[in-house]
Amino acid sequence: MRTGSEPVTARSPLRMRFWFSVWGLAWAAAGTVAFALAGRTAWAVACGVLCLVVVVDMTLVVRHIRQGAHFQPGRDVPPYDPPRT
């Protein structure tokens, strides 16, 4: 019997995180272009750095998605030693 408090069917929301990254990348790229055209160099650089952060995050998310599911212990394996009473 598991003694942890996590749900048995818990899943990582990687696909949702990927689509949020796509949305953020679109806005950051649009901000970079808009601020560059408006002559706001500092804001354009900030949005460009944000684009780089989002691309790195997307790369890691895609890597984790492609790795697939990892081993999860069965119900009879507790995630830690049960408390001694």
Image (spheres, grey):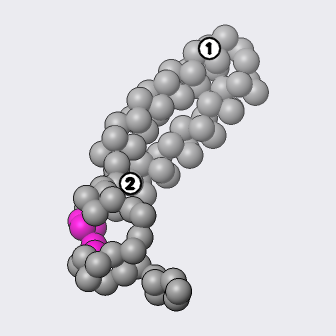
Please give left or right for residue 71 compared with residue 46 in the image. Answer: left
Residue 24 to residue 40: above or below: below
Q: Residue at x 66, y 11 (%)?
A: 38
On whether residue 66 falls in the magenta region, the answer is no
- Amino acid type shown at disc 2: Val
- Please tell me whether mark 1 sits on a helix, a strand or a loop: helix
Q: Which residues are magenta?
A: 67-72
In the picture, residue 5 is in which quadrant?
Answer: bottom left
Number of other residues with Cα within 10 Å of mark 2, as a class: few under 14, some 14 to 19, many 20 or more: some
On whether residue 68 falls in the magenta region, the answer is yes
Please give left or right for residue 76 compared with residue 38 in the image. Answer: left
Residue indicated by mark 2? 61
Query: Is residue 65 among what the camera can see?
Result: no
Q: Position of residue 18 (x, y in %)?
A: 36, 43
Query: Is residue 85 among what the camera can see?
Result: yes
Furthest residue in direction front, as rendered? 85
